[in-house]
Image (cartoon, rainbow, N blue to C red):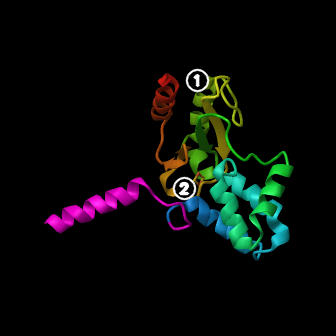
Amino acid sequence: MQSLTAEATKTQKSQSTPKKTSETDKRFKTLDITIKRNHYRQDALIEILHKAQESFGYLEPEVLEYVARQLKLPLSRVYGVATFYHLFSLKPSGAHSCVVCLGTACYVKGSGKIMAALEEELGIKAGETTPDDKISLMAARCLGACGIAPAIVFDGTVAGKQEPEMVLERIKAWQSKT
Ligand code: FES
């Protein structure tokens, strides 16, 4: 019994601090598919980064490192390309980030309504940050979590089966913190 409890605690712990890999984060799986489809070609870097941004909302360091590893490119090269093109966003400027999936599966389950509610509450559009620099709102095309649609990423953690009220509650908690 004791070992069962210990095992459960261990599982809970590992679930609360998941390491982001293609095994634990389905967005990396989606990225893998794109990389494979491009046959790991280094000259497909821009296209791959574009797809990565669609999945993640922005290009966080872990994603850039992952792409560099998979394409066997120096990280500096990947950073160089990601910072050169204005269409790439390296990080949300807000203290908190909220990425709403507008991919088909999520959209039919209401993510469009969630985005509209967020835009109204925050007074900004997708791709923008609130004037107080607290919250950045972004859109993604598919997070690779269609089974739990509609999916939203709050500060890098994917949450499924979201509804406008739940999302607004979360946002308001961020807003109320000083
Ligand atoms: S469409 Fe939203 S996770 Fe796939």
Residue at 60% across / 54% down in the picture?
A: 143
Q: Around disc 2, counting alpha carbons within 10 Å, would you say few (fewer than 14), some (14 to 19), or many (20 or more)?
A: some
Q: What's under tag 2, amino acid-wise?
A: Cys
Q: In this view, does 125 lie to the left or right of 156?
A: right
- Extent of the magenta region: 1-23
Q: In this view, does 67 lie to the left or right of 11?
A: right
Q: In this view, does 1 lie to the left or right of 166?
A: left
Residue at 20% across / 66% down in the picture?
A: 4
The residue that mark 2 highlights is 146
Residue at 70% across / 65% down in the picture?
A: 67
Residue sitting nearer the eye, 110 or 17: 17
Disc with the residue nearer the chain's start (2 vs 1): 1
Residue 154 at x, y percent in the picture: 53, 42
Q: Is residue 30 magenta?
A: no
Residue 53 at x, y percent in the picture: 71, 52
Residue 92: image tag: none
Q: What's under tag 1, amino acid-wise?
A: Glu
Mark closer to the observer (2, 1): 1
- Vertical relation: 67 (above or below) 104: below
The residue that mark 1 highlights is 121
Alpha carbon separation for disc pair 2 and 1: 26 Å
| Magenta span: chief secondary structure | helix
Residue 101 at x, y percent in the picture: 61, 46
Residue sitting nearer the eye, 105 or 36: 36
Asked whether mark 2 and ligand 1 are closer than 8 Å, the reply comes as yes
- Vertical relation: 72 (above or below) 93: below
Q: Does the magenta stretch include residue 14?
A: yes
Residue 86 at x, y percent in the picture: 84, 45
Residue at 60% across / 66% down in the picture?
A: 29
Quadrant for the N terminus, please.
bottom left
